[in-house]
Amino acid sequence: MQKREVRQDDDRTRPGRLFVVGIGPGGPLDRSGRAVEAIVASDCVVGYTRYVELVSDLTAGKELIATGMTREKERCRLALARAQAGKTVALISSGDPGVYGMAGLVLELAASERITVPIEIVPGVTAASALAAHLGAPLVCDFAVVSLSDLLVPWEQIRRRLEAVAAADLVVAIYNPRSQKRTRQLAEAAAIFRRHRPGTTPVGVGTALGSPGEQILLSDLDRFLTLPIAMRSVVIVGNSTTKRIGEWFVTPRGYKV
Amino acid sequence: MQKREVRQDDDRTRPGRLFVVGIGPGGPLDRSGRAVEAIVASDCVVGYTRYVELVSDLTAGKELIATGMTREKERCRLALARAQAGKTVALISSGDPGVYGMAGLVLELAASERITVPIEIVPGVTAASALAAHLGAPLVCDFAVVSLSDLLVPWEQIRRRLEAVAAADLVVAIYNPRSQKRTRQLAEAAAIFRRHRPGTTPVGVGTALGSPGEQILLSDLDRFLTLPIAMRSVVIVGNSTTKRIGEWFVTPRGYKV
């Protein structure tokens, strides 16, 4: 981690710094102590509008910079600029900033713009873990995490990964499964998994995890496509051993029970 | 989730319940508010000895049941029995109980022994997320999580999964990479990835995350096998796009920076 020199001609002695903070699935109880400390210590909180609202209990008196969806670069640049100006800044992501969050982009931008403030990534509970906890224990053995968003990644690469994961009998957590404009990808993913797994394979869908309107649905590979699934959903597809135990989904780890 | 009926002939009106709690990487700041609440609300805390010690700041006056490694079934049975007897019980795992933790086994045992106390899984930050935050953003795109322990899973299945993940150019987080007795598996995994990725591919190793003695090491695919790697380590192997930016490892997500 690079440290910014304290400028002697500055009337403040504290150099700026940037926390990239995961707030977990969404509610106040989902946050780690480290995430709370980072936000409380910050002068300025930057994030997507809905995430800034989710931490409003911690931000009284702080500068708030909330911008809309797809403004990720702008948010990172604003957070870096504030930190370079000597502020302590929290750039917040829901879940874990290291899983489809802002951690990568902010480090890339800091390097390309030669901004050398200290940066600390504060991990959070990612949506796959949060959904798994509601469902039971689908991810308790090996698994893969794949996003179906082909905005930044060619679909051919995503398709190849889904094929490999399906063939290797890995449980998969699917992020960004569907949006209003983008519906074909999830149907194609389901078809790939259906070629390798029975139609009765358990599938769980979590939407708006940790927020009002949270919805957890249990289904199977042959039927889950008809469920309400949107941008804010995560989908977990079991493997050949994942089974239902009452209301729970469990992927057995091989213990003799 | 199944609810246990309150027995009318009991002199207590509160039925027992079981929390399966992830305490995150290890330190007090790593815990979520929900994990703290569950432990504080419990009469009895059950776990592997080291994990029970990690939450000692929360357990004054509570019954503590700490058992050694490989006693997972015993711990689950003790926790279920205490809950069935009317106690509120926290069965604790480091990291996330839903990722190589106790969530699966306890649900399987509850079903096979027909124990119907309410069970709630409290997710935590898993070691892969914690290590990724120290390294930068290696897992910010698609990734897989694979354990090399062949105690409960045939090695042939693990090897097949590693081959699939390597060929699909997925970043991988490897749990249980090596023990004193079990050293061949990590070398074989490295050879598999080396056939698909250059020797300069970034590899990060985290040991004793969140605990005193925490160690984070940066290396590459050709050299990391000589590092100190043990049971308590997690290893992240980058993919063909993962790059070093100063001291950070980042897997770019495709933003134009």
Image: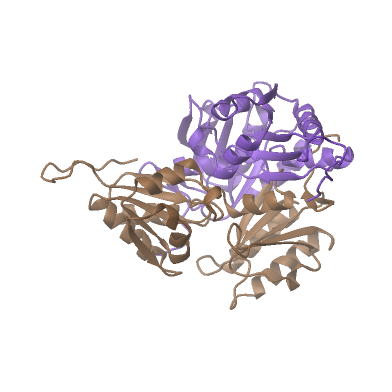
Chain colours: A brown, B purple
Q: Is residue B44 above or below residue A30?
A: above
Can residue A232 be seen? yes
Q: Is residue B67 above or below residue B24?
A: above
As drawn, is B156 to the left or to the right of B239? right
As drawn, is B147 to the left or to the right of B155? left
Tell me where residue A205 sits by quadrant: bottom right
**Closest to the observer: A198 or A11?**
A11
**Closest to the observer: B4 or B143?**
B4
Q: Residue furthest bottom?
A: A181
**Closest to the observer: B149 or B131?**
B131
Can residue B221 be seen? no
Q: How many numbered markers are drawn? A: 0
Residue A240, horizontal then vertical, whole percent:
81, 52
Q: Residue at x 65, y 64 (%)?
A: A159
Q: Residue at x 71, y 34 (%)?
A: B89
Tell me where residue A193 sits by quadrant: bottom right
Residue B51, horizontal then vertical, whole percent:
61, 28
Tell me where residue A147 sits by quadrant: bottom right
Residue B254, horizontal then vertical, whole percent:
46, 62
Q: Residue at x 23, y 49 (%)?
A: A86
Q: Is residue A64 above or below residue B221?
A: below
Residue A22, horizontal then vertical, whole percent:
48, 51
Q: Quadrant of the C terminus of chain B?
A: bottom left
